[in-house]
Amino acid sequence: MMVEYKLYVGQILVQAGLTGMYIIVRIAFDNGMNRFVYVAYRQAVATLVMAPIAYFLERNDRPPMTCTIFWQIFLIALSGISVSQNLFFIGLAYTSATFTAAIINVLPIVTSVMAIAFRYEKVDIRTKRGQATITGTAICVGGAMIMTLYKGSTISLTGTLVLKLSTWFLGAASLVVCLLFLAAYLTFQVPILKKYPAQKSFIALVLLLATLQSTVMALIFEPHISSWKINWGIDLFSIVYSAV
């Protein structure tokens, strides 16, 4: 029972940490930190943190790597981290922390639908688990709608109205596409982890591949060396906080 409770407490702590990340990273972006560079640095720090943990804890239990599994993990890293996080932080920069948090709270719904569609999960409304799934879905949808309608972008009838609307819609569209990629990232981990049941090593490899992918993307979209310089204040803190 204690192990089961730890899983739920862990999920709650992750959500609390993500809420703080929305605010901290938004402040860093407002101070001029480049979004693509941030994602690349973030994955690099996360890899440095996770790789030693995975190496020492699973050095005797790690299954052999095959080409098929490697490329599946490569695609997982590309969709679930490299592409989705860049879209996520574009959305965060062009909307607001409140709107971003509300939209991301819809992720369990999209993931559930995708998992059911690919037959990785089943929902039986006669069971408590099925009833909890449906209830949680309704709460997620209701909460996201309330948060979005309660707090949105500030729009004034000035000459910048079209610009504000266009950037807001760009940010919202980026978050919606990000949701789809994140749902795929979570859903398709199921068959891969059955073939490669070393979770920590799997995550470390995903982070390593995402670091390489994100660095290439950042160099393409932001080739100027000056953009790769970070200050020792909010920039560094946001990178380390979100990575860990």
Image (spheres, helix red, strand yellow):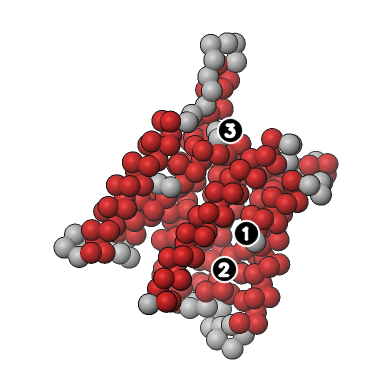
Depth-wise, is mark 2 or mark 1 nearer the camera?
Answer: 2
Where is residue 49 drawn, in percent x and y?
A: 68, 68
Depth order, front residue of 165/79: 165
Residue at x 73%, y 36% (from the top left corner): 31
Q: Residues within 10 Å of mark 1 (few under 14, many from 20)?
A: many
Quarter placement of the N terminus:
bottom left
User: Which amino acid type is marked by label 1?
Assistant: Ala
Image side of residue 221 versus residue 159, left or right: right
Q: Give the residue pinned by disc 2.
A: 203
Judged from the image, the secondary structure of the residue bearing numbered disc 3 is helix
Q: Are marks 2 and 3 in contact (CB under 8 Å)?
A: no
Image quadrant in which you'd find residue 211? bottom right
Pick whichever of labels 2 and 1 is earlier in the sequence: 2
Judged from the image, the secondary structure of the residue bearing numbered disc 2 is helix
Where is residue 177 drawn, in percent x and y?
A: 47, 43
User: Which amino acid type is marked by label 2?
Assistant: Ile
Image side of residue 218 versus residue 95, left or right: right
Image quadrant in which you'd find residue 166? top right
Residue at x 41%, y 30% (from the top left corner): 149
The count of marks equals 3
Q: Is residue 240 above or below residue 173?
A: below
Q: Give me the C-alpha separation between circle 1 and circle 3.
A: 23 Å
Q: Residues within 10 Å of mark 3 (few under 14, many from 20)?
A: many
Question: Which residue lies most toward the bottom here?
Answer: 60
User: Which amino acid type is marked by label 3?
Assistant: Tyr
Quarter placement of the C terminus:
bottom right
Where is residue 126 drawn, in percent x and y?
A: 16, 63
Q: Is residue 151 above or below residue 187?
A: above
Q: Are marks 2 and 1 in contact (CB under 8 Å)?
A: no
Q: Give me the C-alpha separation between circle 2 and circle 1.
A: 10 Å
Q: Give the residue pinned by disc 3.
A: 94
Q: Give the residue pinned by disc 1.
A: 210
